[in-house]
Amino acid sequence: MSNNLHRHSKRVRFAPIAIGTGVLAAVLLSVTMSGTLAGFVASINNTTNTAASGALLMQEQNSTATVTCLSTDAGTISTNTSTCATINKFGGSTSMVPGTAVTTTVTIKNAGSAQVGTFTITPTAACVQANSGALNGTAVDLCAKLNLVLTNTTTSQVVYSGALSAMGTVPITIPTPPAAGATNTFTFAVTLASSAGNTYQGLQAAVPLTWTFAS
């Protein structure tokens, strides 16, 4: 009987210790969890992160803006090369006389969204002489008697000055290309030399020219 009382007494004595230990463990667990879940947090979610290519699009117009040619006229932006036969940069005159000049104005616009790196105009073939009309002189060097002054009037820069025969087929760099959405205006002044005599009558000269934007 005394042994049973002794064991019961020990259980009673240790019960508060066990309860206290359990409570302490719960408190410690609560503190630990609070430390993990609590605190300040700041964040930024960037949802728009994109990169896109620009487009080079060239537009050419005559002085009255009644004729417009685009680099995409022959296809799409994937080809971006076209032929414009409706703007004659030498004026197309058939009545020039020695010592006179014919001036033609055209505008080139950067109609795309990309910045132009280099801007050139290239004679894609050498100057060629041909007959014009029914009455033709016998001279064979009309290209040497026609002088061209090409001026970027927007920037007041002379791009080319010399005989049509001297243009060659090398690209001519045009300084200060137009920014996206901007336009450059060019004047082509063609003069028939005052030394041209009767043998230069009824003749014409032609030079195909290509404008080029490159990024």
Image (cartoon, rainbow, N blue to C red):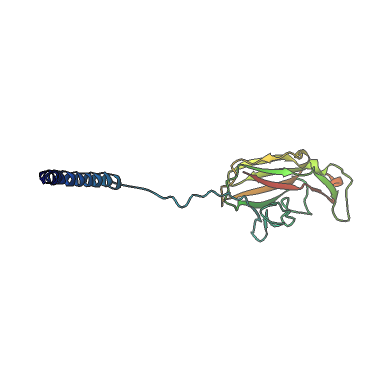
Q: Nearer the viewer, residue 139 or 62?
A: 62
Residue lying at 78% horizontally and 54% vertically, measured from the top left: 95
Is residue 107 left or right of 130 when viewed as pictured?
left
- Residue found farthest to the front: 1
- Kindly tell me whether residue 73 is visible in this rendering: yes
Q: Tell me where residue 99 appears, x and y as whole percent.
A: 75, 45
Does 112 sit left or right of 195 as displayed? left
Q: Quadrant of residue 35?
A: top left
75 is higher (above) or lower (below) than 9: below
Examine the image and state in which quarter residue 126 appears: top right
Residue 26: percent from the left, percent from the top? 22, 47
* Residue situated in front as seen by the camera: 146 or 71: 71
How many marks do you count on the picture?
0
Point 45% across, 52% down: residue: 47
**Residue 195 visible in the current orientation:** no
Say which of 94 and 12 sits in front. Answer: 12
Position of residue 44 measured from the top left corner of the image (x, y, whole percent): 39, 49
Q: Quadrant of residue 74?
A: bottom right
The residue positioned 84% from the left and 53% from the top of the image is: 132
Q: Residue furthest bottom?
A: 66
Q: Is residue 41 left or right of residue 65?
A: left
Name the image quarter holding the C terminus: top right
Residue at the image position 80 percent from the left and 47 percent from the top: 205
Residue 102, how many percent across, how many down?
A: 71, 50
